[in-house]
Image: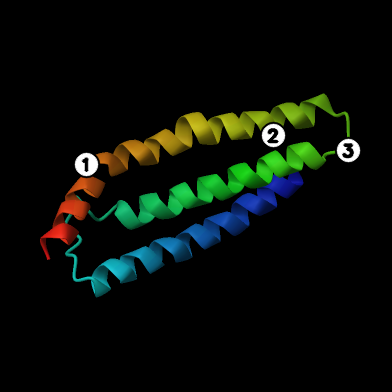
Amino acid sequence: MKHLTEIRKRENRRAARQSNGVRKKLQLLEVPLSKKLDRIPTDLGDIEEICRIYISAVKLLRSSTTKNRAAAAALLKSIRNDLYIHLPYHLKGLRNPLNILVDELEKK
């Protein structure tokens, strides 16, 4: 599980950079990030982070040569938590703001 912890730390830093990149792009597109739209960059960065961690976790599971059931269970629990708790949180928060953002971009 040490490997997944390291992956999470790396992906967390990457998500922060991705969020900043999205924020800068929206500023370049002259989209005012109102209170309703302010979370979009963070949610998009976190969703990317969740996806990357999921891919890494599945690769770790496939490539594991050990028969350690506890380690496999912990890895699958981590996948479950990301897919059923963390990801839906960000998806729910994006639904309306993303629609507003798309409408705003299509106006110009």
Residues at discs 3 and 2 in contact (Cβ within 8 Å):
no
Residue designated by label 2: 75
For the point 68% across and 53% down, which residue is it? 6
Q: Residue 59: x percent and y percent?
A: 72, 43
- At 43% from the left and 55% from the top, the residue drawn is 45
Q: Circle 3 is placed at which residue position?
A: 65
Picture quarter with the C terminus: bottom left
Question: SS at mark 3?
Answer: loop
Q: Amino acid at mark 3?
A: Thr
Residue extending furthest toward the left = 107
Residue on which disc 1 sits? 96
What amino acid does circle 1 point to? Answer: Asn
Residue visible at 15% across and 52% down in the picture = 103
> Looking at the picture, does residue 106 appear above or below residue 57?
below
N-terminal of the pair, mark 3 or mark 2, is 3
**Amino acid carrying mark 2 in the image:** Leu
User: Disc 2 versus disc 1: distance between alpha carbons?
Assistant: 32 Å
Q: Residues within 10 Å of mark 2 (few under 14, many from 20)?
A: some
